[in-house]
Image: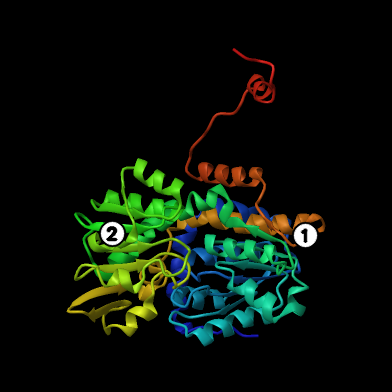
Amino acid sequence: MESIIKDPSLAGQGKLNLELAERNMHALLKVRERFAKEKPFAGMKIGMALHITKETGILVRTLRAGGAQVAITGCNPLSTQDDVAAALATEEGVLVFGHKGESSEEYYNFLNQVIAFEPDITIDDGCDLVTELLTKHPEKAAKVLGGCEETTTGVIRLKAMEKDNILKFPMVAVNDNLTKHLMDNYYGTGQSTLDGIIRASNILFAGKNVVVLGYGSCGKGCALRAKGMGANVIVTEVNPFRALQAKMDGFRVMKMEDASKEGDIFITVTGNKHVIRTEHMKVMKNGSMMANSGHFDLEIDVAGLEKMSSKRRIRPYFDEYAFDGKVIFLAGEGRLINLASAEGHPSEVMSLSFCGQALACEWLVKNKPSLSAKVYTLPEHIDDDISRLQLEAMGTSIDELTEEQKKYLSSWDVGT
């Protein structure tokens, strides 16, 4: 097999970007250092469908240090960084399939290239690789030891597969690590989403009404960062507790039918389908902008918008739609704005997420005999170890329990 990338001549810049990411991913480098000695994946193949970014490249190198051969493709048609793809394709034991702006046909062809690689372990972001493997290649799925899933959307799909008895091998919900969903989703998505919107449009957030659809970890991060830039934040939710959290955090909470009339910038982070529909777009203010930071491009009804509008591309991945005597804008084609128009999450936060992926692969190898075709969460001590690695990288020390304190916390007989 050979890599399929856009332009091999970009490899030089890609190597520089990988070097920059490595400088800020100290926790993952500690894992790599141990893997290089212990070789937990000797003789194994790992197939990946992740955003091909400089940070993902450091995960690839970590798995290679552990002895694995690696094949990687993107998990979104607009998220591959072509220079990084070119750089990784030059490295021994690595196959790369992907480029920015893939067609749907190319996207699925690349997924199937990774499946043809016959991986022992899968690493997925959104569950497209595992879905393709289970539904179209059951004979290859039967050989898979297990896999890991990076994102909320993918975990939702995996749990539905488990419920319907479709899942055929154990999967680790890496997204459920505290060091993932309370770091990557919260700090990473918040910063990178606004970064993508600003790069796409150069819009000023201060004084704008920003509507955040969904108040999970990603929505919380987006709302906090928008507030920090001077925006007036409105939250829409279907979950009563999350709506209550948003209200207690000082944000206005209302139905989307009302928020549609007030918003200047709309950010979708729900993991659900058509949370912005044409009836919402029709009442939006002239010049409003929509952006999605959920995994799939279904959160905004782009097809419905295109049916009722005329379209112009104003800037790269920034489109104007005209209808009913007004215009509204869509950033990043309704795909992940933080990767379509920016570079994804900062390296420091991805170091934590990818420690989770690397250690989840190791956990699968060590525990395979006792695992069934279910969705698992990593043991708490592994999550704690990731936090310790990052604290060490940041030069931060914390206290330890005394023996007396440990005894007290495990007892029941000491009261008032």
* Residue 173 image point, x, y percent: 62, 57
Please name the amino acid that badge 1 sits on: Ser
Which structural element holds mark 2?
A: helix
Which tag is nearer the camera, tag 2 or tag 1? 2
The N terminus - image quarter = bottom right
The C terminus - image quarter = top right
Residue 101 or 206: which is nearer the viewer? 206
* In the rendered image, the vertical position of residue 291 relative to residue 218, given as above or below: below
* Residue 116 image point, x, y percent: 68, 82
* In the rendered image, the vertical position of residue 369 relative to residue 93, given as above or below: above
In which image quadrant can residue 96 be found? Answer: bottom right
**Contact, CB < 8 Å: mark 2 with mark 1?**
no
Please name the amino acid that badge 2 sits on: Asp
Query: Which class describes the residues within 10 Å of circle 1: few (<14), some (14-19), or many (20+)?
Result: some
Task: Residue at 21%, 60% (x, y): give it.
Answer: 204
Task: Residue at 48%, 67% (x, y): give it.
Answer: 295
* In the rendered image, the vertical position of residue 187 relative to residue 50, given as above or below: above
Query: Which class describes the residues within 10 Å of circle 2: few (<14), some (14-19), or many (20+)?
Result: some
The label on residue 372 is: 1
Apparent side of residue 240 relative to residue 277 in the rendered image (left or right): right
The label on residue 258 is: 2
* Residue 264 in view here: no
Q: Residue furthest left?
A: 325
